[in-house]
Image (spheres, rainbow, N blue to C red):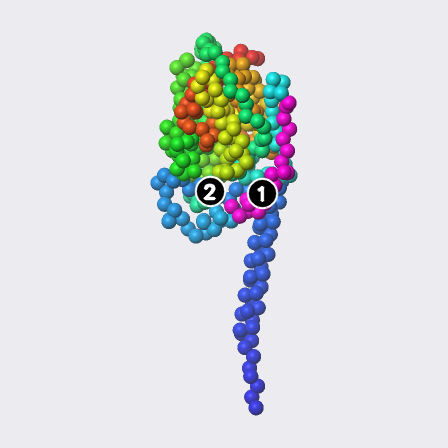
Amino acid sequence: MKRKRRNKGGTRFYMMMSIICLTVLFIGYSYVYNLSEKRKSGQDITTISILYNEGSDESKTSAIDKIMSYFNIFLEKTFKEKESSNKLIESVDKSNTEVFKKIESNETEEKDLEIYNEREEKKPITNTPLFISSNRHENFFKIIESSPASRSSAPRNIIIDAASVNEKLNVVIFHTHATEAYFPHVEGNYRSHDETYNVMGVGNKITSNLKSLGIDVNHLKDYNDYPDYNSSYANSSYAVSQVLSNSKKNVLIDIHRDGAEENSSYEQFLSRVKTTIINDKTAATCTLVVGDKNGNSEELKKNAQLLFNISEQMYPGLFRDVIVRPGAYFNQYYSDYALLLEVGSTLNHIDEVNYTIELLTNIMVEYIDEIANTN
């Protein structure tokens, strides 16, 4: 009687496949674990770019791009901190000298204003945009407070020695996230190249207003968040570094707009504080953001508070807060006079923003004049 011959080849094949599968699972687990640890330590681990709606074709996106995009969203939801883990330290009264709000958390959430380490890269990077199903990030700032009262203030007559200002200051307006847009431009998840609705257009108008008063302004019209959103801060860092002055004070104004994920708690907050009444007209409110990882963070806070105080004197309620973001740079290491200014949000109509631009121009003139005349 013949013995049946064992299929040794088949056994080896299944053993090899089992080993390969276990290895892949181990590597995948290690990768996810390392990313989660980086997220907990506050490091920026964004792995995707934004596919903009204008001139884009989602069908051309490769399968691996889509997988990586959804993997990042899975990672965000898996390791997102609980709302209760965030605490705010804020002043009791805005009339006090300190108006800062600082976010403390055990983990760092996904954010629009990503942290960028200037010592890692100083050259602009451009990659092929990838697919993403949603690019709004919930609860970037955990702020819980009541809506500020509607206020009004008398209009101001502006008098400034432009020649003196131009001799002392290098005023630069730029946009790390230039495609950020306002209602009613909802396409592309409030991101657009249409300067009628985006923050590049806001920069255009403020620049034009300041120049009409004789103030020299260098408006950098780079779309630093397109086509690769992940490289926004690397790109804007490089752009700003090319126009710094060695003989003047560098006033660097990075204009953004606020926003929140739809139906999130932060969107509910924004809906309460998105506008204020100035001279019987509706204006979009603003915030200032300071990255506390900069070596000059104390000076940054001091100068942000100066702008806030000027705004409160001229148009009370226009600025909501000065927010300190732990572990962030935001390219503010270049100058003690670097401002990250959020003008309105996705909930604001462009008409409200345009009125805010008029008010901001007057505030900026006062702020610029004060800096120019301070040793």
Residue 96: horizontal and vertical position, in percent? 63, 18
Amino acid type indicated by mark 1: Lys
Q: Is residue 288 left or right of residue 227?
A: right
Q: Secondary structure at mark 2?
A: loop
Residue 312: horizontal and vertical position, in percent? 54, 17
Q: Kindly indicate the quadrant of the structure image that contains residue 180.
A: top left
Q: Which quadrant holds the C terminus?
A: top right
Q: Which residue is mark 2?
A: 134
Report if residue 360 lies within the magenta region: no
Closest to the observer: 280 or 159? 280
The structure residue drawn at horizontal position 50% and vertical position 24%, both measured from the top left corner, is 286
Q: Which residues are magenta?
A: 73-92
Q: Which quadrant holds the N terminus?
A: bottom right
Amino acid type indicated by mark 2: Ser
Q: Is residue 48 above or below residue 176?
A: below
Q: Which residue is mark 1?
A: 80
Q: Residues within 10 Å of mark 1 (few under 14, many from 20)?
A: some
Closest to the observer: 166 or 198? 198
Residue 22: horizontal and vertical position, in percent? 58, 61
The structure residue drawn at horizontal position 43% and vertical position 24%, both measured from the top left corner, is 352
Looking at the image, the residue that sits furthest to the left is 55
Q: Which mark is residue 65?
A: none
Looking at the image, the residue that sits furthest to the bottom is 1
The structure residue drawn at horizontal position 47% and vertical position 40%, both measured from the top left corner, is 135
